[in-house]
Amino acid sequence: EAGVTQFPSHSVIEKGQTVTLRCDPISGHDNLYWYRRVMGKEIKFLLHFVKESKQDESGMPNNRFLAERTGGTYSTLKVQPAELEDSGVYFCASSQDLGGPDTQYFGPGTRLTVL
Amino acid sequence: AQSVTQLDSQVPVFEEAPVELRCNYSSSVSVYLFWYVQYPNQGLQLLLKYLSGSTLVESINGFEAEFNKSQTSFHLRKPSVHISDTAEYFCAVSVRGNTPLVFGKGTRLSVIA
């Protein structure tokens, strides 16, 4: 069974440009999470989808970030316009909804560098 | 709100020596506890987890962690490390199922030959 995949693995853009990150969760996983790790700091939650609905977007830093999960399958995270402080590694994770504690499976991450 | 503290940002240790990576958490409610590992150039992998029951949990590669409620700790231990254990280790908590994880800052374990 394929794991969580993310594309691209690396992205280098200039300040003011737009970047779109993609996450494909494990098939059948209704929960999809986005996290971000800025250099030297902890991994922080951005938002949580249950199927195609945003369950919790309390971690989104500002309105330059837009996440979508059309059809409840893959998800995209768009940053527009990108700023220097957006640089970091963006992780996606997915989990099944089993009615109890879930185990989140992480993708390899997308390393975003904003120059 | 929950928080996780990993006091050691870097831990160097000689091969075949024991190691303990410390994790303390803060929460006003019961939590689930996790250790994730990130090997060089790879993504995060679940190492072990505590959900309920026995407070001592083990991984398939020789790591173990013990949930200590009174000390709000979930330290990770291995009696004898290998070069291949060189990685960054993250402690995380969640308060119930299907909710975001709260991570510590990570501990970089370097195993020296």
Image (cartoon, rainbow, N blue to C red):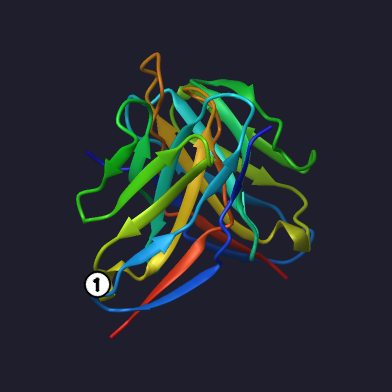
User: In the image, what residue occupies the spot 36% across and 17% down?
Assistant: A98
User: In the image, what residue occupies the spot 43% across and 28% down?
Assistant: A73
Numbered disc 1: secondary structure: loop
User: In the image, what residue occupies the spot 47% across and 60% down?
Assistant: A9
- Where's the C terminus of chain B, which quadrant? bottom left
Viewer-nearest residue: B16 or A40: B16
- Percent position of residue B6, x then y: 56, 56
User: In the image, what residue occupies the spot 53% across and 25% down?
Assistant: B30
- Percent position of residue B89, x then y: 44, 58
Viewer-nearest residue: B107 or A79: B107
In the rendered image, which residue does mark 1 sit on?
B82
Viewer-nearest residue: B64 or A34: B64
Q: Residues within 10 Å of mark 1 (few under 14, many from 20)?
A: some
Q: Residue furthest top?
A: A99
| Chain label for disc 1 | B
Q: Residue furthest front?
A: B70
